[in-house]
Image: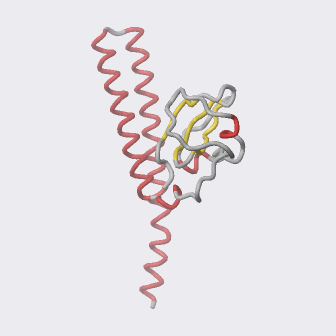
Amino acid sequence: MRKLIFSALIAATAFPVAASAQTAELRRDRQDIRQEQRDLRDARHHGDRHDVRDQRQDVREAKREYREDWRDYRRSNRNVYHRPAYVGPRGYAYRPVNVGARLGSPYYASRYVISDPYRYRLPRTTGYSRWVRYGNDVLLVNTRNGRVIEAHRNFFW
């Protein structure tokens, strides 16, 4: 019985540590992306075309690594991304949406806005942009004009 209780206590303390390690890794990846983008900007101002090409490649690699780490986090925390059935606004039907498309204002009403994007490891919004649930997708929408800025398909299970 003692061994069972002891192993349960160890397991209870180990899981939050693993989740925080994944979060720290994602944070470091975002910092790497920002640094590579700064280096690209400097190369555009002060370097030649070879420097710019190399820096663009570095930015692409940093973004790819961030996506892979985010997918690993999502796979290991499936319960966070499991949501109840989606019910859209009356009279509207789901159609896949691309960046640049325009959504009607009922879609970014408070019922569909993701109020805590950090819970899903989504980037912070600024100004008039909001993360919106649209079916099982997540869209970053400019609420002033309804334009989709960013889209993540099949975000929720």
Color scheme of the displayed model: secondary structure
- Total of numbered circles in the picture? 0
Q: Nearer the viewer, residue 33 or 140?
A: 140
As drawn, is 121 to the left or to the right of 25?
right
As drawn, is 12 to the left or to the right of 109?
left
Kindly indicate the quadrant of the structure image that contains residue 144: top right
In this view, the residue farthest toward the front is 91
Q: Which of 156 and 105 is in front in this view?
A: 105
Q: Where is residue 127 in the image (x, y as percent from the top left)?
A: 67, 29
In this view, the residue farthest toward the bottom is 1
Q: In this view, does 41 lie above or below 129?
A: above
Q: Residue at x 52, y 55 (%)?
A: 81
Q: Where is residue 8 in the image (x, y as percent from the top left)?
A: 47, 78
Q: Which residue is drawn at 45% across and 88% down?
A: 2
Q: In this view, does 12 lie above or below 37?
A: below
Q: Which residue is drawn at 47% across and 43% down?
A: 153
In this view, the residue farthest toward the left is 50
Q: Residue at x 56, y 38 (%)?
A: 139
Kindly indicate the quadrant of the structure image that contains residue 11: bottom left
Q: Where is residue 51 in the image (x, y as percent from the top left)?
A: 31, 15
As drawn, is 64 to the left or to the right of 133?
left
In this view, the residue farthest toward the right is 110
Q: Where is residue 55 in the image (x, y as percent from the top left)?
A: 34, 21
Question: What is the quadrant of the N terminus in the image?
Answer: bottom left
